[in-house]
Image (tube, rainbow, N blue to C red):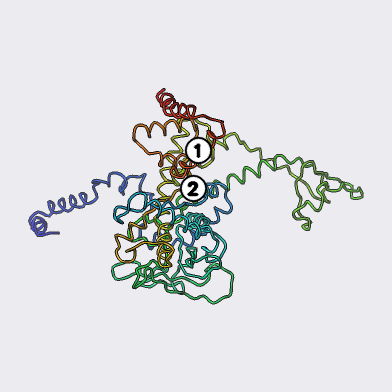
Amino acid sequence: MNVIDKVVHFFNPSAGVKRQQARQIAKIMNTGYSHGGASKRKKSMIGWISSGGSPTEDIDENLETLRERSRDLYMNTPIATGALKTIRTNVVGAGLRLKSQIDYTVLNMDEEQAGVWEAQVEREFKLWSESIFVDTMRMNNFYELQQIAFLSFLMSGEIFATLPYRESPGTPYQLTVNLLEADRVTSPGGRDTETILSGVELGIYGDVTHYHVCNIHPLTSSSKQKEWHRIPKFGEESGRQNILHLMIAERPEQRRGVPLLSPAIEAIKQLGRYTEAELMAALVSSMYTVFIKSDSPDEAPFGESISESDQVDAQDENSYELGAGAIISLGDGEEIEQANPMRNNATFDGFVRSVCRQIGSSLELPYELLLKHFTSSYSASRAALLEAWKMFRMRREWLAARFCQPIYEEWLAEAIALGRIDAPGYFDDPLIKKAYCGAEWNGPSQGQIDPLKEVNAAIKRVDEGFSTRAKETAELTGGDFWRNLPQRVREERAMKEGGLKDAEEVLEDDEQSEEQPAGEADS
């Protein structure tokens, strides 16, 4: 009670009590969000028991379980496997390819000089990237490492990579890529401290300074002694990234990644169980088995028509197996009761599709693409693909920026240091270094439902100046216009010299290809 309440209560106790009651009622009256989502009075919300925590409580403390369940779903549930592989294939495909794009104006080059420099860099990078010596384990080339890294990121929510140098036969480059599964980065002894959370060591500003990497996988059955290596995130003098951490944060102050399937784990698991049950019910219903019961102990029993080699538990005398057209004799005092599932599967497909729509929504993957089920109209199917490609492009740009580009810059520095690439001023000026490091990373094309319509639309965009031939070539076929152009010139010249086409026909074909598709697109 404040001073005024006390005075009123002293002279008029009844009025004082009313003031107190009014004050308490005002405290519990709904205002703002308390009318809806934050209401504690509505019957529909009273049963909603929720609790909140920091990223440490909400994410870090649940990561071990989330990772294990996510991987289990990937390995054993078709929907989860298909979802992650579909995203992997569309984002990475056979690997994101380098297209050097230097800022030649900063480097005082003309366009022709820039083209020569870029071609030389791409040749040298191809020499390094297509070799299995890129991989510290000597198993995968750079493009295959991209696939592994991205798929592991989807399953585990994050992945780490170190960039050690090793001498390799047959290549002048020593840079290698060593991928580390997310579980390897843990706090020493499995115990967090004030500055080390889930294997990530923090500085005074909350920034990540070091990662603690276990020498063996924590889930391995190996008896090898566990040891932790403290790896600084950046080199003290060079500023080089000693370890790459691929994750996408959902909240501020989040330092570990969450598996992509996390919001849909329960739905996917239950759908998998439901599908298994329906499959088993259909299988049992299809098995016609006759059981023979005899009251005469001397009568010779019919042999089981299921051969012992085909039985899964022939050693168990108390086990009876069903089989197509099997005839099984029962022992003394044994009876059989028919168990016919009689399952109504008419609603199975509709129910599964409904659940898959929700799962696809949580993964940003349209239902049509999740199930590879394109039975709607052209417009609906194309809309689904366009929506999915918003996510694919976002993740591709993220992978290029967080994995491909840092590794490319590390390789380029080694190539320049070895003298195989000439780049004056690269180590002297950060702006010059950035100009040399410019690059695009091209992956698989979107594909077309109706190629003719897609090509006509691309031609129209180029004609109206909305796009370029180089961009449309990359998006339609994943190719490179500037490499296609000289090849087309050689082909047309060869056809002309071979007498298959004269100059006038070539000119007519070129004019028709420019005019006809535009008219079709307008129609």
Residue 124 at least partly seen: yes
Q: Position of residue 492 (x, y in %)?
A: 51, 36
In depth, the one of 127 and 364 nearer the eye is 127
**Residue positioned 44% across, 48% down in the render:** 442
Kind of residue at disc 2: Ile
Disc marking residue 87: 2
Q: Position of residue 262 (x, y in %)?
A: 46, 53
Q: Position of residue 299 (x, y in %)?
A: 91, 47
Left or right placement of residue 133 versus residue 361 in this view: right
Left or right placement of residue 288 versus residue 186 in this view: right
Residue 358 at least partly seen: no
Looking at the rendered image, the quarter that the C terminus falls into is: top left
| Total count of labels | 2
Tell me if label 1 and label 2 are in contact, CB under 8 Å: no
Report helix, strand or loop for mark 2.
Answer: helix
Quadrant of the image occupied by residue 500: top right
Looking at the rendered image, the quarter that the N terminus falls into is: bottom left
Q: In the image, is residue 462 above or below residue 118?
A: above
Crowding at mark 2 (Cα within 10 Å: few <14, some 14-19, many 20+):
many
**Residue positioned 23% across, 46% down in the render:** 31
N-terminal of the two: label 1 or label 2? 2
| Residue topped by disc 1 | 368
**Residue positioned 50% across, 58% down in the render:** 129
Q: Position of residue 115 (x, y in %)?
A: 39, 51
Report helix, strand or loop for mark 1.
Answer: helix
Kind of residue at disc 1: Glu
State how far apart marks 1 and 2 are (Cα). 13 Å
Disc marking residue 66: none
Crowding at mark 1 (Cα within 10 Å: few <14, some 14-19, many 20+):
many
